[in-house]
Image (tube, rainbow, N blue to C red):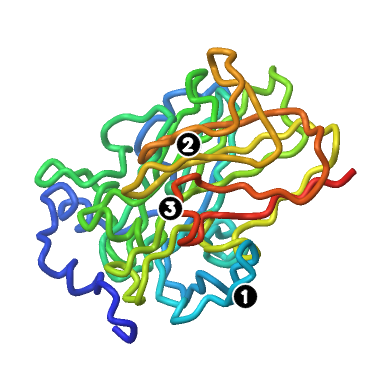
Amino acid sequence: MADGEADIAALAGGIPVPPKVAAAAARPPSLGPSAMPVANATGTRREYWIRAETVRWNIVPTRRDEMMAAHVGGRTRFTALAYRAYAPNFAKPLGPATVPGPLLQADVGDTLVVNFQNATPGPVTMHPHGVFYRPEMDGAYKGKYTDPGGFVQKGRTFQYVWDCRPDSVGYWPYHDHGPLDPLPVFKGLLGAILVRDPAVRQPDVEFPVVFHSFPPQATGLDRAFSCANGRAFAGNTPTLRARNGQDVAFHVIALDNEFHTFHVHGHRWKDASGRVIDNVTLGPGDSYTARFTEDNPGRWLYHCHVFSHIHMGMTGWYVVGA
Ligand SMILES: [Cu+2]
């Protein structure tokens, strides 16, 4: 490994293939209709083709921390693992592999069908939060109880089928939950699901934000980076833009080993109890939507308010036009 990062292939070599996975692997791979009945057939079938890949990833492309007007030294590139969206039957990529991966979108009543292919060196998966699924669609490694979707080997494909029920409305993470978990997550195998209720007014503008980190144990880099959407430091993390008067929603996920907070300068919103806040705490695996009517044009910061995380990169610009 050029960077000295954790070696997925070497680590995967010592893990026995679970019995149900071996039995399924003996059959030829198929991208046909799922053997699983679609549990909720009243809505639309939202089908995705997603491949887990290795990708050279620069955490700080500008080499600048614009908030502190400072140079960011040292190596910032490593070999990440990332989800990438493809056209049907993996005919061609729809864009680059990204951290977080493609946003999976559906309405209440829809069925999410994800054809997942693994092009990384070790067994990885897609495990969703928020949606409804049977145990075999869990995408989780469970030792000898592991179903094929919980141990997708290199070169294999598995079709996940998940239902978006009324209690699935919201913004949720998905991530690897294979036998090497959490290492692949710390290399970038994470993403988000957005389930809408079309009967409810939607925001004018929405910002999916995933707070996570790239630790040296996963990247082989000299230092840890605290990230928003795969990048660290303002000017590298997403610069989010809105206009005065818009109905704005920040959808925030925390997905690493830390507690984070979500804070936006110059703005407030109400929590579920009706209390006005401008900072909310998220633990690992939590998601949260901060929604308000924009009334304060200017250049603002959004960030996690854990001070060490701010200075490891978990900051970004929020720019509001008049
Ligand atoms: Cu934080």
Q: Tell me, for residue 212, which label it has, or none.
A: 3
Q: Earlier in the sequence, mark 2 or mark 3?
A: 2
Residue 184 image point, x, y percent = 32, 60
Disc 1 within 8 angstroms of ligand 1 (CB):
no
- Between 96 and 293, the one nearer to me in the picture: 293
Amino acid type for the residue under numbered disc 3: His
Amino acid type for the residue under numbered disc 1: Thr
- What SS does tag 3 mark? strand
Q: Tell me, for residue 62, which label it has, or none.
A: 1
Of the 4 image quadrants, the one containing the N terminus is bottom left
Q: Spot the residue most to the right.
A: 322
Residue placed under numbered mark 2 in the picture: 172
Between marks 1 and 2 in the image, the one whose residue lies nearer the viewer: 1
Label 3, label 1: how far apart the Cα atoms are = 19 Å
Label 2, label 3: how far apart the Cα atoms are = 14 Å
Specify whether residue 92 is in view: no
Q: Spot the residue most to the top.
A: 273
